[in-house]
């Protein structure tokens, strides 16, 4: 595969995109875990979700 005279730019662009995507995926996973821990802590203190009361009333 011949990328021509701009091969370095093309490869660098793909590498930057791959690094950014990996960073975003990692951030989403870590943020989701943080929010889940916060929800678990609230539920442990007895705080319930409003949607939970509606589900039990049906």
Image: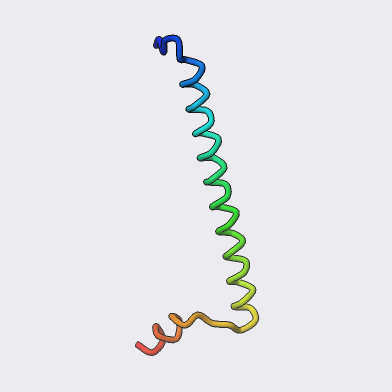
Residue occupying the far left of the picture:
58
Q: Residue 58: x percent and y percent?
A: 34, 87
In percent of the image, x 39 and y 83: which residue is there?
Answer: 55
In percent of the image, x 61 and y 84: which residue is there?
Answer: 46
Picture layout, residue 3 above or below residue 56: above
Q: Residue 40: x percent and y percent?
A: 60, 71
Q: Residue 16: x percent and y percent?
A: 53, 31
Q: Residue 24: x percent and y percent?
A: 53, 46
Q: Nearer the viewer, residue 14 or 28?
A: 14
Picture layout, residue 48 above or below residue 2: below
Q: Nearer the viewer, residue 4 or 36?
A: 4
Within the image, what quadrant is residue 20 found in? top right
Picture layout, residue 56 above or below residue 24: below
Number of marks present in the image shown? 0
In percent of the image, x 49 and y 21: which residue is there?
Answer: 11
Q: Locate the N terminus by quadrant.
A: top left
In percent of the image, x 62 and y 69: which residue is there?
Answer: 38
Within the image, what quadrant is residue 41 found in? bottom right
Q: Nearer the viewer, residue 5 or 54?
A: 5
**Scheme of colours in the image:** rainbow
Residue occupying the far bottom of the picture:
57
Query: Horizontal placement of 30 versus 49: left or right?
Result: right
């Amino acid at each position: 595969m011949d990328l021509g005279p701009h091969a370095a730019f093309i490869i660098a662009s793909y590498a930057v995109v791959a690094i950014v995507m990996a960073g975003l995926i990692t951030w989403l996973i870590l943020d989701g875990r943080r929010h889940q821990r916060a929800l678990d802590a609230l539920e442990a203190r007895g705080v319930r979700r409003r949607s939970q009361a509606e589900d039990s009333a049906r």
